Amino acid sequence: MVERVFVYGSLRRGAPGGMARLLRPGSQPLGGARLRGRLLHLGAYPGLLPGGSGWVRGELHRLTDPLAVLQRLDRYEGCASAQPAAEFRRVELEVLGPAGQRLTAWVYLYTGCVGGRSSVPSGDWLSACRTAVGPRH
């Protein structure tokens, strides 16, 4: 079983809403990572479409308790019961790790409607959130 997960949106440390807590306990942050794809703005969170020429930036985590952590994340992402209408699905993809090494990790891909959705041009959800909120005083 793959023992890494790549997170790019609301599960990242420092993302609004504090959902990164779902990765604890049972995982260890490994650092920044990226993969080929495009981020869509879905409102309070992004969705990832794999492939293409763009890069999506996120974090890589090593799963010390893969089954427990993946069950929590599957419930959060709405794909725990393999519903055909689920908005996300979990797949294994190749990512570039913190040192640029090629690694396999679990990634949650967006499966919903793409029409009318705007992209996150930077491929970095945290950066887009900070820009939308503006500078903090």
Image (tube, rainbow, N blue to C red):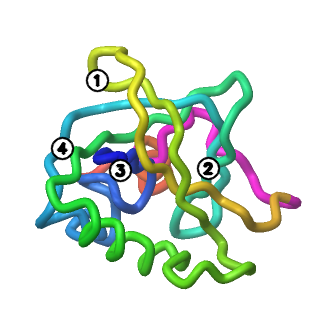
Residue annotated with mark 1: 98
Find the residue positioned furthest to the front: 1
Answer whether labels 2 and 3 touch (C-beta < 8 Å).
no
Front label number (4 vs 3): 3
Nearest to N terminus: mark 1 or mark 2: 2
Q: Residue furthest right?
A: 115
Earlier-in-chain disc, 4 versus 3: 3
What residue is disc 3 on? 1
Q: Which residues are magenta?
A: 115-126
What separation in Å lies between label 2 and label 4 (alpha carbons)?
Answer: 20 Å
Question: Which residue has dot 2 on it?
Answer: 48
Amino acid type, label 2:
Leu
Q: Residues within 10 Å of mark 1 (few under 14, many from 20)?
A: some
Front in this rendered view, residue 40 or 51: 51
Structural distance between the alpha carbons of marks 3 and 1: 21 Å
Query: What type is the residue that disc 1 sits on?
Result: Pro
**Is label 2 in a helix, a strand or a loop?**
strand
x then y, percent, for residue 78: 53, 79
The residue shown at (55%, 52%) is 91
Q: Earlier in the sequence, mark 1 or mark 4?
A: 4
Secondary structure mostly seen in the magenta stretch = loop
Q: What mark, if any, has residue 63 been given in the picture?
A: none
Residue 43 occupies which quadrant of the picture? bottom right
Q: Which mark is residue 29?
A: 4
